[in-house]
Image (spheres, rainbow, N blue to C red):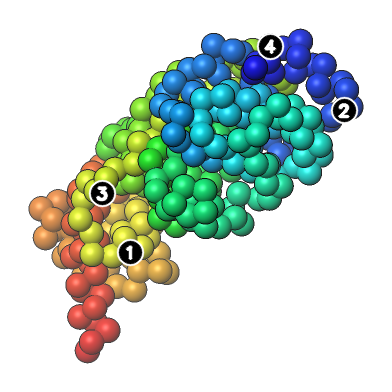
Amino acid sequence: MATLGIPANTIAVLQKYHFNFQKKFGQNFLIDTHVLEKIIDAAGVMKEDFVLEIGPGIGTMTQYLAEAAREVTAVEIDKNLIPILADTLSGYDNVAVINEDILKLDISKIAEEKNGGKPIKVVANLPYYITTPIIMGLFESHVPIDSITIMVQKEVADRMQEKPGSKEYGALSLAVQYYAKPEIVAVVPPNCFMPRPKVGSAVIRLTRHEQTPVQVDDEKLMFRIIRASFNQRRKTLANGLSNFPEIHLEKELIQQSIEELGLPVNVRGETLSLEQFAELSNILGKKIENKSNL
């Protein structure tokens, strides 16, 4: 039975192993059974599911996942937690723990071996400093994913849902919305963790699109354009793109492309929708190709 969501049991495990929290790994362990149940519910974990958990800590959420899913693979970077996980998960025969950096792991291979290549569910309580690289790594590597249900900093969760024109709208908003439908399912105050973080958190579910909402000729080029647009937010879109070394076009051609979109040449990147970025990418892509053929 899952018992680690109870604070006294978490404290007992930490004391037993004389565990010291590692700031470099951004460790904050959940100690609220209601939040844990909400995460499992939001992730829609069923008995036939294979779940990849990132950052199991001492195994608090892993216990809940093991009781809900067919099989769980938990990836933990901190080697000091491995003996603790061997203890707290000893009652479950459907959990495997991998001591590895998730960014260096071949997740497609795990999905193939454990789930026959079918889409997997990812659940995680992510260290805030590494949220974006992990999420983008999962999406960009085209790992077969059904959904990602994660605990992140509240303002990061908000950013993932933002629409054009707002101050928080940016490259992360566009990237997440290109690959998935984001939905905040719970707001979690600092007192639900040990130790308490300085900021509020949120659980957000990213449900993978079966088909991306926009069609783009060159995905990598579109994301280069998006990055360049938000790299210097105060500049106009044309200036941002012409100053970006990865986009090899003269400013006049960039301005011409923006006008082809039906937008003024002094428009800022933060006002463009995902559809407009995809269209701009297709227009610029053709101009880059024509230039290289000259």
- Of badges 4 and 1, the one in the foreground is 4
- Give coordinates of residue 249: x percent, y percent: 29, 73
Whether residues under marks 1 and 2 lie with C-beta atoms below 8 angstroms apart, the answer is no
Q: CA distance from mark 3 to mark 1?
A: 16 Å
Name the residue nearer the viewer: 114 or 35: 114
Label 4 vs 3, first from the N-terminus: 4
Identified at 68% across, 15% down, the residue is: 3
Q: Secondary structure at mark 2?
A: loop
Disc 3 from disc 2: Cα separation: 46 Å
Q: Earlier in the sequence, mark 4 or mark 1?
A: 4
Q: Amino acid at mark 3?
A: Thr
Alpha-carbon neighbours of circle 1 within 10 Å: few (<14), some, or many (≥20)?
Answer: some
Is label 3 in contact with label 2 (beta carbons under 8 Å)? no
Q: Residue at x 67, y 42 (%)?
A: 97
Q: Earlier in the sequence, mark 1 or mark 2?
A: 2
Tell me the SS state at disc 1.
helix
- Does label 4 or label 2 sit earlier along the sequence? 4
**Which mark, by number, is residue 6?**
4
Mark 1 = which residue?
221
Q: Which residue is mark 3?
A: 212
Q: Please, is residue 67 above or below residue 250 in the view?
A: above
Q: Which of the two discs, 3 and 2, labels the residue nearer the N terminus? A: 2
Judged from the image, the secondary structure of the residue bearing numbered disc 3 is: loop
Q: Nearer the viewer, mark 3 or mark 2?
A: 2
Quarter the N terminus occupies: top right
Distance from Cα at disc 4 to Cα at disc 2: 17 Å
The mark closer to the camera, 3 or 1, is 3
Is residue 171 visible from the viewing direction of this image?
no
Task: Report the Cα–Cα distance between label 1 and label 2.
Answer: 49 Å
Residue 227 is drawn in which quadrant?
bottom left
